[in-house]
Amino acid sequence: MNKSVLIIEDEPLIAHDIFYCLKDIGINNVKISLKYESAIKEIGEYNYDLILLDINLSGEQDGIDIANFIINNNPTPFIFITSYYDKQTINRAKKTNPAAYILKPFNKQDIQVNVEMVLHKASYNELNKPEKIFIKEKKELISINPSEIDYVEAYDNYAIIHIKGKSHIISHTLKSIEEKLSGSGFERIHKSFLINFSRISMISGGYVFFEEKEIPIGRAYKSEFMAKISAL
């Protein structure tokens, strides 16, 4: 896999655990930074495909400070890996819009699935540039960019389009919406749900997450969906 990843973690044993998890899925271009200063230098000098970032670092600055540096200086997808999951920390982290959030203690699969998911999302964003679509709501036609859609939910012979916490009910079946959005980075993961791959925040325990909203991965769709994530 021709991808480059930077691990920012101040505990060497954990950093090397992550390193070997990445090696096992074929990512060979991996660097480790144990300190804030070296991490900032790496981010400033090199372009990585993905950064794995611990929130709690020794020193005054933490991983969220690094995330803000990434956003402002060299925009790169990043995943927070941390044991800190109190509300205040999560609220700070959410403001940086991480590609995913993995809690310690993690296992090998947590790392591999989320890394593959984020890299796959990046590929979708690069290859698929969807045009706007129009939906009819009451007497108006509303312009929607498919990239802003989180997921579409079946509702009898209707469909509910969920966009950043808002929803629109339209008189189309989920199947017809799936056909319209085919090739734009959408995946059917359940008989009742069509999801936008680029909007996923995490995959865990048989569910796909969009911030706090969890959507089950249907048994009939799971193998194909997970295979697509692994086919990087």
Image (tube, grey):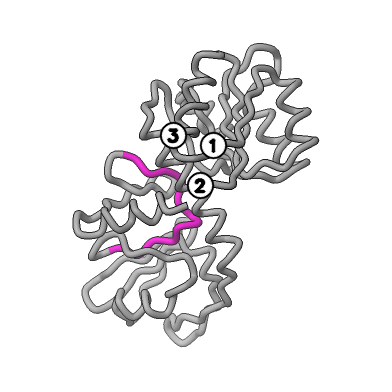
Q: Badges 3 and 2: C-beta atoms under 8 Å apart?
A: no
At which x and y percent is residue 203? 37, 44
| Residue 216 shown in magenta | no
Circles 1, 2 touching at the beta carbon (< 8 Å): yes
Which of the labelled discs sits on residue 118, or is there none?
A: 2
The amino acid marked with disc number 2 is Val
Q: Is residue 198 magenta?
A: yes
Tell me the residue at 42%/53% (across/down): 231
Distance from the alpha carbon under mark 1 to that under mark 3: 18 Å
Mark 1 in CB contact with mark 3 (< 8 angstroms): no
Between 46 and 114, the residue placed more toward the observer is 46
Per the model, the C-alpha gap separating discs 1 and 2 is: 8 Å
Say whether residue 21 is left or right of residue 65.
Answer: left
Picture residue at 63% right of the left edge, 24% below the top? 32
Name which quarter of the figure residue 56 lies in.
top right
The location of residue 174, given as percent across then percent down, is 30, 74
Name the kind of residue labelled 3 in the image: Asp
* Residue at 64%, 12% in the rendered image: 58
Q: Residue furthest bottom?
A: 139
* 41, above or below 173, in the image: above
Q: Element at badge 3?
A: helix
Per the rendering, the mark at residue 89 is none
Whichever of labels 1 and 3 marks the residue nearer the N terminus, that label is: 3
User: What element does badge 2 sit on?
Assistant: helix
Q: Nearer the viewer, residue 28 or 123?
A: 28
Callout 1: SS: strand
Residue bounds of the magenta highlight? 193-204
Front of the two marks 1 and 3: 3
Q: At x 48% / y 35%, what residue is drawn?
A: 101
